[in-house]
Amino acid sequence: MLEVLKSLEELLDARATCDTDDGLALYKIALVPTMGALHDGHISLIKRAKELGQVCFVSIFVNPLQFGPNEDFNNYPKSLEEDIAKCKELGVDYVFVPKESDIYPAGRENTKIVKGDDDLSHRLCGRSRVDHFDGVCTVVKRLFELVRPHIGVFGEKDYQQLLIIKAMVKEYDMDIEIVNCPTIREASGLAMSSRNKYLSESERELASNIYKELKIIRVEIKNASDLEARKNYLGFAKHQLESLGIQIEYLEEFKSRIFVAAKIGKARLIDNIAL
Ligand code: AMP
């Protein structure tokens, strides 16, 4: 039976029932952190969490700390009732819907982890979204401390985030296995995202070119003779997408993947592909 936990107290009570009175684990606990507006990408993570763990927690919290001042925090899509219904159907045990004060008891800024100048947080998305990964790490660390999962499940759609969370778990010596799930896409190839709700029908169609181009890039990069040729091809591909009317923030090779961030209408979209 699904239980919706709307406060820290409810979460801690529910979590305590997963341990013996002496604090020994009775069950393997899997957590899927989300910002809600659940789609098939989130659902694939929940299914994986159900396979790997015995008790499945899903958190739904639109984390203010990971949004920049001119970003979409106030308009971020919300569909809590539908989200809860989806979780129920999937056999989730607990949906944790914390209040901001549950996550940031001492206030946002006082709780914030600052990642400093590490290599991962300040490239790709970190260049334009300067505090974004500090905000992500802060909320994930807090959720990990409260829920104390054995497994945390994350999507490869946000591959940079996945790498940063793996690094954070290592840095803080957290005994949590981070599991990645492949990107779930629309039939058109467009990576599913809560932010796709911002797209009109024609923008959605335009957005499907991002993944089409990533697949072409993968072939071209494999065939490229050297680093220079690879770089040149990426420049060409960026130009191709821009000529369709897609504004490209970056299109880069990093750690044997191609990463892209693009703006279409009101939506900032990201995607990546393994080479
Ligand atoms: P969000 O609600 O956008 O913060 O995402 C919550 C989790 O779902 C993150 O681990 C994301 O990487 C993952 N996720 C989002 N979109 C997809 C997708 N299309 N396929 C797989 N995982 C996804």
Image: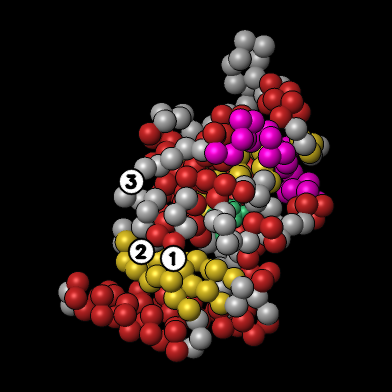
Task: Say which element carries label 2.
Answer: strand
The stretch drawn in magenta includes residue 227: no
Q: Is residue 85 above or below residue 107?
A: below
Q: Residue at label 2?
A: 257
**Residue 198 locus on image (x, y percent):** 67, 71
Residue 181 shows which numbered tag? none
Instruction: Rate crowding at label 1 as few (under 14), some (14 to 19) or many (20 or more) other CA atoms within 10 Å.
Output: many
- Name the quarter where the C terminus is drawn: bottom left
- Looking at the picture, which amino acid does disc 2 mark? Arg
Q: Which residues are magenta?
A: 84-109
On the picture, is 235 further left or further right than 38? left
Residue 142 in sight here: yes
- Looking at the picture, which amino acid does disc 3 mark? Asp
Residue contact between numbered discs 2 and 1, judged by CB atoms under 8 Å: yes
Task: Say which element carries label 1.
Answer: strand
State the residue at coordinates (67%, 46%).
61
Real-space CA distance between mark 2 and mark 1, rounded to the nearest whole angstrom: 7 Å
Earlier in the chain: of badge 2 and badge 1, it is 2
Q: Residue at label 1?
A: 272
Task: Say which element carries label 3.
Answer: loop
On the picture, is 21 further left or further right than 122? right
The stretch drawn in magenta includes residue 90: yes
Real-space CA distance between mark 2 and mark 3, rounded to the nearest whole angstrom: 19 Å
Q: Is residue 38 above or below residue 139?
A: below
**Residue 216 locus on image (x, y percent):** 39, 80
Quarter for ligand 1?
A: bottom right
Viewer-nearest residue: 202 or 104: 104
Real-space CA distance between mark 3 and mark 1, rounded to the nearest whole angstrom: 21 Å
Residue 118 shows which numbered tag? 3
Nearer the viewer's eye, disc 3 or disc 1? Answer: 3
